[in-house]
Amino acid sequence: MSLPAIIVIVLATVAAMEFVAWSSHKYVMHGFGWGWHRDHHEPHNNLLERNDLYAVFGAGLSIAMFALGSPLVMGASAWAPGTWIGLGVLIYGVIYTLIHDGLVHQRYFKWVPKRGYAKRLVQAHKLHHATIGKEGGVSFGFVVARDPAQLKRELKVQRERGIAVLRDAVEDR
């Protein structure tokens, strides 16, 4: 494969992974997979969460794509784009870990951004955690963050319609 094709595949995969993560978060983690995700929405002092199993699943996807693209594993049946898709999934996983686990939830470092897109990411994800339980909610993505003011309005509408139950601190605003 040519270098430009490899770069396009890797970048397209990283971009596509935000949609995969968004839809997985909204429909799996807040759906039938809530059992693994619930502890992420509840206060605790544990180093690890059951929710971290989703990262293991993501790593497995990346490894599977690397294997699919590897002549050492697949022989003549290897599919070259698989390696580069696997790399894109891996890069997204690193970005997710740094932004979601590191910046937003401060599992690895302590820094509260005062302005810019980093602040917007933190605010949007805090609004995601404003609901109690798996119903309703906003901001299911991890890298793309919408305007927090719009997200607050959406939460208010969800509360008024009985779709979401909000934590007291959010309802008072």
Image (cartoon, rainbow, N blue to C red):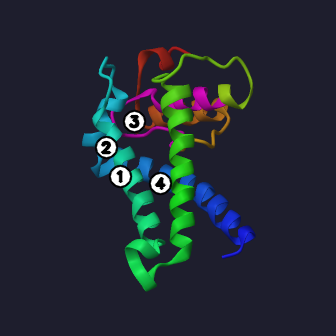
Q: Are marks 4 and 1 in contact (CB under 8 Å)?
A: no
Which quadrant: the C terminus?
top right
Give left or right: position of 140 versus 48: right
Q: Is residue 126 visible?
A: no
Identify the disc placed on residue 53: 2
Q: Nearer the viewer, residue 165 or 46?
A: 46
**Residue 55 seen:** yes
Which element type, helix, strand or loop, lies under badge 3? loop
Q: Secondary structure at mark 1?
A: helix
Give x and y (percent) for residue 21.
49, 51
Mark 3 and mark 2 in contact? Answer it, CB < 8 Å: no
Q: Which residues are magenta?
A: 120-140
Q: Magenta includes 138?
A: yes
Q: Residue at x 70, y 71 (%)?
A: 5
Any mark on residue 23, and which? Answer: 4
Disc 2 and disc 4 in contact, CB within 8 angstroms: no
Q: Which residue is mark 1?
A: 57
Q: Is there CB contact under 8 Å for labels 2 and 1?
A: yes
Label number found at residue 162? 3
Q: CA distance from mark 1 to mark 3?
A: 33 Å
Q: Which of the two residues, 41 or 173, is positioned nearer the viewer here?
A: 41
* Amino acid type at mark 1: Phe
- Which residue does the image show at 48% across and 37% down from the upper left? 158
Comes first in the chain, label 2 or label 4: 4
